[in-house]
């Protein structure tokens, strides 16, 4: 399966459909993103949306977030999802490698990501692509309305 990975630069009907199809595969609580919401994501200076395409169809995506802090430029990979129909074909690896390349080119000191323990295949992929597990805890605060 030939795959290309590119930074998303415009929102069209195919991209809206792709996110409608992909986000529920990432999270059962993911909300549908409108064309306007996707355009707003594209306009964020800190965020690059990468899209993997195969056979003229978007089959995966990830968000690369880069931000300067006092200890240097940092990068995070978020919301990695590959279509169920395309898993196991190197698409996730292609997305991650492009994110690593872009972060390195920008001068990021590190690239972090998190993954649920239950996502065994994804965790094997990340370790194969030279991500090291850290002795850390992730804390989350969820504001209430």
Image (cartoon, helix red, strand yellow):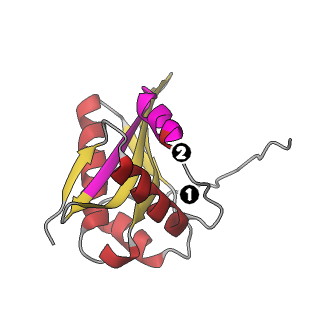
**Classed neighbour count for the residue bearing mark 2: other residues with Cα under 10 Å, few (<14), some (14–19), many (≥20):** some
- Residue at 31 percent across and 41 percent down: it is 8
In which image quadrant can residue 92 be found?
A: bottom left
- Does 83 sit left or right of 101 as displayed? right
Q: Residue furthest top?
A: 70
Q: CA distance from mark 1 to mark 2?
A: 38 Å
Q: What residue would you read off at disc 1?
A: 135
Place residue 86 in its image quadrant.
bottom left
6, above or below 46, in the image: below
Q: Position of residue 100 (x, y in %)?
A: 29, 47
Q: Per the image, is 137 magenta?
A: no
Residue 43 falls in image quadrant: top left
- Place of residue 137 in the rendered image (x, y in percent of width and height, measured from the top left): 64, 55
Q: Quadrant of the C terminus?
A: top right
Closer to us: 42 or 46: 42
Q: In the image, 118: left or right of 72?
A: right
Q: Which element type, helix, strand or loop, lies under badge 2?
A: loop
Q: Is residue 17 left or right of residue 7?
A: right
**Relative to 106, residue 56 above or below:** below
Residue 110 seen: yes
State the residue lying farthest toward the right.
145
Asked if 25 appears above or below 104 in the picture, the reply is below
Whether 39 is among the magenta residues is: yes
**For the view shown, which residue lies furthest in the front direction?**
13
Q: Nearer the viewer, residue 44 or 142?
A: 44
Looking at the rendering, in which quadrant would you find the N terminus? bottom left
- Identify the residue under disc 2: 34
Name the residue rendered at 85%, 44% in the picture. 144
Q: In percent of the image, x 54 and y 48: which residue is there? A: 33
Residue 87 visible (yes or no): no
Within 10 Å of the Cα at label 1, are there few (<14), some (14-19), or many (20+) other Cα atoms?
A: few
Q: Which residues are magenta?
A: 36-52
């Amino acid at each position: 399966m030939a795959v290309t990975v590119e930074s998303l630069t415009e929102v069209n009907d195919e991209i809206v459909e792709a996110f409608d199809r992909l986000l529920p595969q990432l999270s059962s609580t993911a909300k549908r993103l409108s064309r306007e919401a996707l355009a707003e994501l594209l306009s964020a200076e800190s965020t690059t949306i990468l899209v993997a395409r195969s056979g003229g169809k978007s089959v995966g995506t990830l968000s690369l977030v880069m931000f300067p802090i006092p200890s240097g430029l940092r990068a995070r990979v978020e919301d990695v999802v590959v279509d169920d129909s395309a898993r196991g074909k190197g698409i996730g690896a292609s997305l991650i490698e492009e994110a690593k390349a872009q972060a390195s080119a920008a001068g990021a000191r590190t690239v972090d990501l998190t993954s649920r323990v239950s996502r065994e295949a994804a965790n094997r992929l990340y370790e194969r692509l030279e991500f090291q597990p850290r002795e850390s805890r992730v804390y989350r605060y969820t504001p209430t309305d």
